[in-house]
Amino acid sequence: MEDIFLTRMSWTNVGGLGGMTLTLQSIGVPEVRVYGPPNAEDFYQALKDFTYFPKIKVRVKPYHLSPMSDDVMTVWQVPIRAPDTSSHGGGLSPRAGSRSPDHDLSPKAGSSRSPSQSPVVRRSSCDVSDIDSESDDSSRSSSPRNSPKSKRRKTSQRDESLVISYICKLKPKKGRFLTEKALMDGIKPGVWVGELKKGNQATLPDGRVIDPTPYVEPDTPGPVFIVVECPGEDFIEPVTTNSQIAKYQEDGDEELPAIVVHFTPAGVAKDTRYQDWITRFGPNTEHLFLNEDTQTTSHEGTASLQACLNIIQPTVFPLLADNAIKPGSLPPLPHKHVRGECLLTYWLFHRDHPLQWDRSSIPLLDNEEAVKGAFALPGFEDSLKEMKETIATAFASDTAASPSYPEVVFFGTGSSIPSKRRNVTGILVQLSESESLLLDGGEGTFGQMYRHYGADVDRVLANIKCVFISHIHADHHLGLMKIFQERRRALQTLGEPQQPMYLIAPLPFMSWINHYRLNCENIGMDNKDFILLLSKDLSVFSNEEQNQEFNSLKKNLGFKQLQVVPVLHVSRSYGLVVTHNDGWKLVYSGDSMPCDALIMAGKDATLLIHEATFDDELHQEAKRKRHSTITQAVDVGIEMNAGFNLLTHFSQRYPKIPLMDNGGEKVGIAFDHMKVRLGDLKLLPHLSTPLQALFQEELQEMRVKQKRHKRNRLGGLID
């Protein structure tokens, strides 16, 4: 994939750009071209505060340039502008923000970053509009940038009235060469066949001059498809009266499209003006709708894994919500209208069935089959029975009721990038029935939350009263924009007032969201949806006890004490220590090497959640990347005298379970969608045996790799 087309500068549209670009870079794609609104360039520049693209060239091409054309298709960009409304964040003209026709955003050799100067924010609460960019010395979280491009606008340049539609026409499909007919006429294989396939005359060795027409089928004309975004009622009139798109309707002079893809909310799609416009494409054009009515089953591997974990311990591993819309629960669509489904395919060109829907790849959820597979594994059923007997015996006299709160839910337990089994970091700490604290929120956190809670997700979102961001790396915060948007929507849906949410974050994150607010869309900052608290001002080395907002945070969330602790990772990385009025104490390490300051601040913690990125064999890599190994994380818990140590943030080289020896009775391994209360912690060490039986194949494979790595490191000195 080398081309990305954006319809709008909204997080729904651009939120995956950073992760997608990193993935393309990791698989060796040398260049990616991004088409769409002018502010896409500013968005990529802001991403460079916490992502690094040294091996891929990113070129942003504003919409007013010539059509894009390659060997596959030609794409025309169609700018559509809604009337100037309150959603319009700034007076950006169609060509504003584009400094040259083709902007190369890759780092230049010898370039250096010169951060823009900004006022120092000295209060622990601050207005995001007062914050500008500030350098972060992490090699992963920032990249070289020429100083003119690193300047940040402090006045709004966003343009929420602009969307881009795309008219796409595939190149003709070359006609098939009729080999059998050619052989019957004495035309044997040779270089002349290539000329005939190209549509040229060819001279055979016997001197005959052959015309290609009888031996090559006619080219198949390339179909047209159109992608339209109509995000709100203000856009209905501009979309339905657009003259460029009208050319591809029945009264126009261009070919009718095979399919029109609509990024259109259900309420807008049902508007009579929009429906009348759709009919003008004629009865043969298909229409695909992607909106809130298209929830379908996805991540079936995650659901199947959770079903297997559920039979080990149903309280700790609850089954995921079934969020697929049931057949018949929505009104039927008109003929040729289709709701999007995960991995639904429409073939524009196919050898066997052109212009046809293909549902063969749509995920099917079969938890029952997954559970059968688990019980078929050698030793699994016996280990499960033994575990249950051990727990029943060990805790037979434990009749005291376990407190309902805190309840900790993991939405991501992997590091760096999301994988099939482990999402990146996101941890919800439910403090009471109506208050919760979110620890980081990497890419995909809301999706995990929705899969976990299903129809109850709005109440869960509304209850989030505070978000703590440990540091600026993308795997810890790229999902927060979506959380902010969905929380705002949830409060509206529930009919509740917009309640300000405390946001504890390092300064570079504040710069990032300010830049996004100014250049892309309003995510609530303009409406004071947040109470912003800088991490450095709440650290164990600061003296902000008298700060009004800090004290209100502690009071509202029931904290006796809250400390933000600088830890040993990249610049401006922090851990969190909270002591609740109910007596429990929770410590979150964020990303860090073993850190004495965290150990001291977290002394005698009830629960320590500590990163354990690497196995012990990779201790040098852990040191180089400033992470902890599993043994180091366990030792931190021992030195801290933590009541329990729950390990997380595992390298994605351990897709299902990390390699570790028995950590003892006070150590557990976190999994995505794990839910634990304090009374559940004592159960976790007893789950080790059935977990090892469930993942025996993966563990064996990792042991082989570990042994190979050790052999290479020691020069073949081990057997």
Image: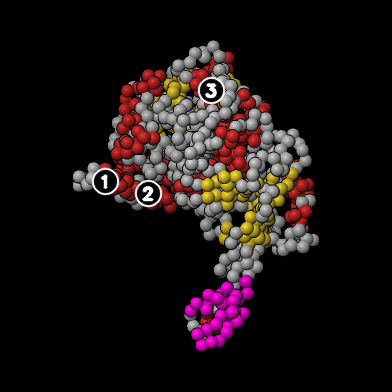
Residue positioned 56% across, 17% down in the render: 123
Label 1: state its secondary structure. helix
Residue 624 position in % (x across, y down): 36, 35
- Tell how many labels: 3
- In whole angstroms, how far apart are the C-alphas of marks 3 and 1? 45 Å
| Residue at the spot of label 3 | 534
Query: Quick one: label 2 or label 3, which is nearer the N terminus?
Result: 2
Which one is in front in this view, the residue at disc 2 or the one at disc 1? 1
Q: Quadrant of residue 643?
A: top left
| Residue at the spot of label 1 | 712
Q: Image check: 537 left or right of 603?
A: right
Residue 680 position in % (x across, y down): 40, 30
| Residue at the spot of label 2 | 374
Name the residue type under label 1: Asn
- In whole angstroms, how far apart are the C-alphas of marks 2 and 1? 34 Å
Name the residue type under label 3: Leu
| Colouring style | secondary structure
- In whole angstroms, how far apart are the C-alphas of marks 2 and 3? 47 Å
In the drawing, what numbered circle is on residue 58? none
Asked if 163 appears above or below 475 in the picture, the reply is below
